[in-house]
Image: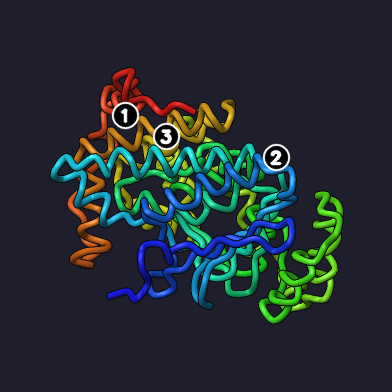
Amino acid sequence: MLSTTAEDEVLMNKVGSKGVITLNRPKALNALNLNMIRLMYPQIKKWEADPHTSMILIKGAGDKAFCAGGDIRAVTDAGKVGDPLSENFFKEEYILNNAIGTLRVPWIALIHGITMGGGVGLSVHGHFRVATEKTLFAMPETAIGLFPDVGGGYFLPRLQGNLGIFMALTGFRLKGRQVLRAGVATHFVESKFMSALEEEILALNETSEEKIDATIKKYQNESTLDAETPFVLEPHLEEINRLFSAANIEGIISDLERDGSEWAKKQLQTLRKMSPTSMKITLRQLHEGKKKSLQDVLQMEYRLSQHCMQDKDFYEGVRAVLVDKDQSPAWSPSTVEGVSDEQVNWYFSKLANDKELQL
């Protein structure tokens, strides 16, 4: 049982002209729930409208996580019984993501520790994302019958080459400085400097993006840990660009099979564990998202989220990975070939007008 009250799940205060948000559920790895979203959104809008607010900084309490994701178990429990939480959670989360992505003032996310799913949505659309050696970044949704949402369809296809497609389909994890090397974080600062960095940012008289960038870079330059370590995926970027370039999942799988290298075999092994439906909708989501605005992507993702609520794989994935933890989901359909184009099109189809996401 968590000791925090509902109001304490997010702490928000002002330091001079700067807004500070602390996600405060450390025992739950600061996982995002609807209450937290409902506390943050109006406060962010209030600060943005206030000419005396010059920037907003967000961080997670404790040493383990910035935010390990959304409260997926609550959402699946609600979806099973038709509780409106399964509509409201995604809707209000995406509205919050859009508010961060369109913010007038600089948004600085200190992504120390686990940063996945919902935590990515709270950081990746802002101006600054500062990783530490303890940052663990992933979008592991295809393993639970979902898709990399919270605007994943916007930022993932904008990473170098086909890196975003590879990460979205496989749930590949990036650690520490690798998060910066991949282009997900904007800066890397060792955790021992983080409190000094935060103090200095909150003491700035001038809060232009250039000034904030220079302040973070000062600490980044002092952070020598893993400075010489090359990007973990560097040896495979050519393969990622070549083997994850097909227009559909069947093509990616046959390219990997044809390649036959140890690395390709390993990727096939990973993909065969994922929900075939999730992989198909994810690939299309990223292909379409590359050409869309953040707002259009979030509207598309909201349709996908609500169709996930009406289908089977999301519930089965959460059961296998998060509830029973047997890691043996029975996907339906169980093969990529079994997922028809009609089924994929249904996932992308419009909702009733009053159900659509309005931004």
Q: Which mark is residue 97?
A: none
Circle 1 SS class: helix
Q: Which residue is mark 2?
A: 104
Q: Nearer the viewer, residue 333 or 67?
A: 67
Judged left or right of residue 177, residue 356 is left
Q: Estimate how packed mark 2 is, as few (under 14), some (14 to 19) or many (20 or more) residues with alpha carbons within 10 Å.
A: some
Q: Amino acid at mark 3?
A: Glu
Residue at 37% x, 41% y is 90
Please identify, in this view, whether the residue under mark 2 or under mark 1 is nearer the observer: 2
Residue type at mark 2 is: Arg
- From mark 2 to mark 1, how far is it between C-alphas? 33 Å
Q: Which residue is mark 3?
A: 301
If you read the primary sequence from the N terminus, does the residue marked by circle 3 or circle 2 appear first?
2
Mark 1 surroundings within 10 Å by alpha-carbon count, few (fewer than 14), some (14 through 19), many (20 or more): many
Give the mark nearest the N terminus, 2 or 1: 2
The location of residue 21, given as percent across then percent down, is 57, 60
Residues at discs 3 and 2 in contact (Cβ within 8 Å): no
Q: Nearer the viewer, residue 355 or 177?
A: 355
Q: Nearer the viewer, residue 208 or 292?
A: 208
User: What residue is rendered at 47% in x and 44% in y?
Assistant: 150
Q: Position of residue 88 (x, y in %)?
A: 33, 40
Secondary structure of residue under mark 3: helix
How many numbered badges does the structure rendering display? 3
Indicate left or right for 322 with 118 as reference: left
Amino acid type, callout 1: Tyr
- Could you tell me how far apart the alpha carbons at marks 3 and 2 are, in whole angstroms? 24 Å
Q: Which mark is residue 347?
A: 1
